[in-house]
Amino acid sequence: MIEQFINFVIRPPRAEYNPEQYLWDKEFSLAGRTYQRQDLELKNARGHTLQCSHYLPSPFPEDTSLPCVIYCHGNSGCRADANEAAVILLPSNITVFTLDFSGSGLSDGNYVSLGWHEKDDLKMVVSYLRSNKQISRIGLWGRSMGAVTSLLYGAEDPSIAGMVLDSAFSNLYDLMMELVDVYKIRLPKFTVKMAVQYMRRVIEKKAKFDIMDLNCLLVARKTFIPVLFGHGSDDKFIQPHHSDLISESYAGDKNIIKFDGDHNSSRPQFFYDSVSIFFYNVLHPPQVSRADKLEKYYDLGDLKLGSGVNENLIYEILSSLRSATADAASSSSALPTISTTKSVTELLSEVAPSADLESVFTEEIVHDNNEPTNDVQDKVNDQTEDCFSCTSSNRESWGRCSSLGGSDEESCADLRADNLPQNTLDVFATPLRSMKEKCSEAKEDEKKLKKNKNKIKKKKKKKGETADKKGKGDRFEKLEALSRRLRHCLLKGSIHRRHESS
């Protein structure tokens, strides 16, 4: 039984694995980016070869150094335990280094020391990373034995940026005494103490360390590195109060998280999120720019124009559009100024409000019974449909921009609903209305000429319709010219942008 306890401490089950099956591939993708695994070997002070792996972006950003987190596994673990750490940290531009400690995994050595000799292995890894100019700050993430290893080394190297300690024990001797009760070994207390002293001598002879020296409470009082403690609330092997004792003695900035689970259970997602945030705050990884930069778009309301479009020309056209829709009797020939801080949607609302825009495209032809003619109404509908078709074709020519909003049919429906109400609106005075007033005066003054009134009215009506169509045609031609100019500008910008991308 004592021999089993000795092996339980210094020779637990050893992880044997195939790196090609249990580690990340040499080249792999994660969160839309490509990474690589670099395998290497390091030798510790005792001459043992350590099998190591370093997860890096592929290709590595030029003229940029990235931080690194060293993952330290437990007493029966290996570097494959760092797979989850790589998934969590690599997308944040934090590289991950992992190793098989001496006596674990595929590295040399016959025994583990629960952190005593492992801290020397960790020192060798830190020294290697310090010599690499691509690595900036260094953090430590350990679990069980790896947590103790990180704490023991952190007390000697204050340059470590931060540590995550998952399920660390406070004192190895106290832990061994607790395990006697956990596994219900029915022996008197003095017999247990004598057995522990015997184990101490055997372990010191075989593994070359004293179990009484593994006391994390002593080193916690002189360690000031920011730390995040984690512990499973149902852990029966290393009970949660061990992390509580270390946290109470710890001298630096600290935080502790308790979660459901035992010593070997998988950790919940919120703990991994906390770890990611912690390392992001202490390591300060750079924001590496993406290779595929997004194209610049101007904020022009619903119309998002690519950077290839001349924005000043757009506002000039809008100025001309508002000038064209102004009162025809205005004597000002200068173009009105438009603030470039306003969006296109706001400018269009200023250029052509609902009532005025309706008056530009439609003018009510009033008969004696106050009903508009069907022919003129059909022409107006055809003209407005032409305008809408121009808008739709422009959105199609923008390519990527069309996906930023709704479909073309939806945009046309919105324009119809917003700018052109269905009800017939009051419009400006027309030659027909003045003609009607003159006819009414003639009717009052010349009652005797009733027979000739209808003939005169028909002639003036035809003349008024001709003048009305002529005035309406001039205004519509101006708007049509401006519409073509605007469409040409947008198409030119889109073609220019496509040529640059090709």
Image: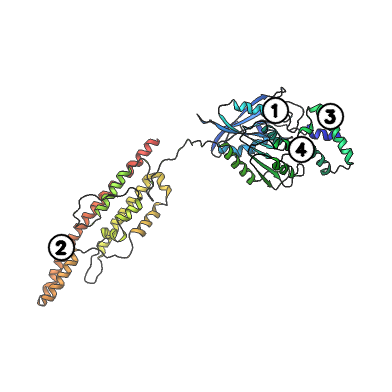
Nearest to viewer (mark 3 / mark 2): 3
Q: Helix or strand or loop: what does disc 1 sit on?
A: helix
What residue sits right under mark 4 in the picture?
A: 171
Q: Nearer the viewer, residue 39 or 329?
A: 329
Q: Is residue 349 left or right of residue 258?
A: left
Amino acid type, callout 4: Asn
Q: Helix or strand or loop: what does disc 2 sit on?
A: helix
Using a 10 Å C-alpha cutoff, classify the residue at mark 4 as few (fewer than 14 neighbours), some (14 to 19) or many (20 or more): many
In primary-sequence order, the first of circles 4 and 3 is: 4
Q: Is residue 45 above or below residue 143?
A: above
**Residue 169 rendering spot, x and y as whole percentages:** 74, 39
Amino acid type, callout 1: Asp
Q: Is residue 452 above or below residue 32?
A: below
Q: Is residue 429 left or right of residue 389?
A: left
Instruction: Give residue 26's quadrant in the image.
Output: top right
Q: Nearer the viewer, residue 404 or 199?
A: 199
What residue sits right under mark 3 in the picture?
A: 202
Using a 10 Å C-alpha cutoff, classify the residue at mark 2 as few (fewer than 14 neighbours), some (14 to 19) or many (20 or more): some
What residue sits right under mark 2 in the picture?
A: 463
Query: Cα distance, mark 1 to mark 4?
Result: 19 Å
Q: Is residue 355 left or right of residue 141?
A: left
What residue sits right under mark 1 in the picture?
A: 120
Query: Cα distance, mark 4 to mark 3?
Result: 19 Å
Instruction: Give residue 130's quadrant in the image.
Output: top right
The answer, for residue 27, to whether it is visible in the render is no
Q: Nearer the viewer, residue 477 or 60?
A: 60
